Image (tube, helix red, strand yellow):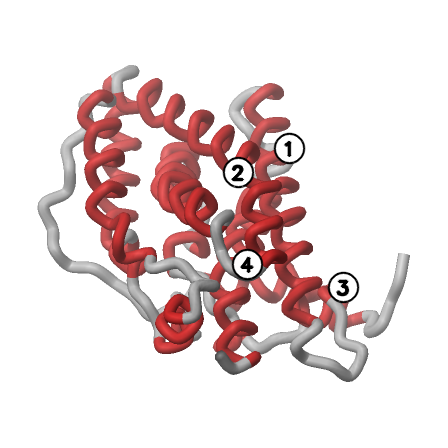
Amino acid sequence: MENQALYKYILGIADNSLILGQRLGELCGHGPSLETDIALTNISLDLIGQTRSYYQYAAKFLGENKTEDDVAFLRLENEYLNVLLVEQPNTHFGYVMARQYLFDVFHLMLMEELQHSKDITLAAIARKGIKEVSYHKRFSGDWIKRLGDGTEESHAKMQEAINDLWRFTEELFQMTEDDRLVTGEGVGIDISKFKEAYYDEVTALLREATLTIPESKFFISGGKEGRHSEHMGYLLADLQYMQRTYPNMSW
C-alpha cells in the first residue's frame, strides 16, 4: 500500500468532518433556540476535533515539517475530497437537520467499522469518536421526526430539504481507486457493503416522520474526486482566510 493512497484515504474521511463542521460553525448564534444553538456548535466542535486527529496523522505522510494546519487550510479546492452533501449551504433549519442526519447515519456506520481497521491510529480515532457521532445521529434524527411530523409548514420545509439533498446520498458509498487499494490491505472500509443498511435505516425514520421517500434515481457526485459545487469556493474563502492572510501565525 502506497503512503499516497493512505494519505488520500484519510483526507476522504477527514474532509467530510471539516467541511460539515465549518457549515455548522456558521450557525453559531443563529440557532432557533439557545439550547439548539449550543448543541449545533458542540457538534461542530466534535467534528473539527475528529478532523484534527486525522490531519495530524495525514501530515506525517507529507514530511517537510508539515502540520495539521497545512493540511486543513493550505490546499486548493480540488484537493479537498469531501462528498458534496456536507458542503451544501444552510438554506434553512430543515436543510441543516436533513443534511446532518443523512450524513450522521453514514458516519456512524463508518466509525463502527473503522474501529476494526488494521491501522491502529485510524482505529483509535474511530473508537474515540463513536460516542460523539452516535449522539449526532440521535440529535438530528429527533429533529427530523419533530419537524416532519410537526406543523404543516415544518413538514413542508423538511420534505423540501430531503427532496433536494437526497441526490447527494449515493456518493457516500462510491469507492475511489485509493479507497479500494487501502481497503484491500485491511486498513480501509468497504463502504459499499452497508449501503443497503443505510437506506433501510434512513427510509424507516423518514416514514416515521411522515415524510415521503424521494423516487428520483438521479444522483450527483464528484466531491470525492475534487470536483465540488459552486458553494465550496465561498466556504473555503472563509475557512482559509486567517491562515492565508497571516501565514505561519501561531496562538
Q: Which mark is residue 242?
A: 3
Sequence order check, earlier mark of 2 and 1: 1
Q: Residue at x 73, y 66 (%)?
A: 69
Q: Residue at x 65, y 63 (%)?
A: 55
- Give the mark toward the camera: 2 or 1: 2
- Asked whether residue 24 is in view, the answer is yes
Kind of residue sitting beneath label 1: Gly
In this rendering, would 120 be left or right of 136?
A: right
Reading the image, the residue beneath label 2 is: 130
Label 3 CA crowd tier, 10 Å (few <14, some 14–19, many 20+): few
Quadrant containing the C terminus in the rendered view = bottom right
Label 2 CA crowd tier, 10 Å (few <14, some 14–19, many 20+): some
Kind of residue sitting beneath label 4: Ala
**SS class of the residue under badge 2?**
helix
Q: Which mark is residue 29?
A: 1
- Asked whether residue 227 is in view, the answer is no
Quadrant in which residue 127 is drawn: top right
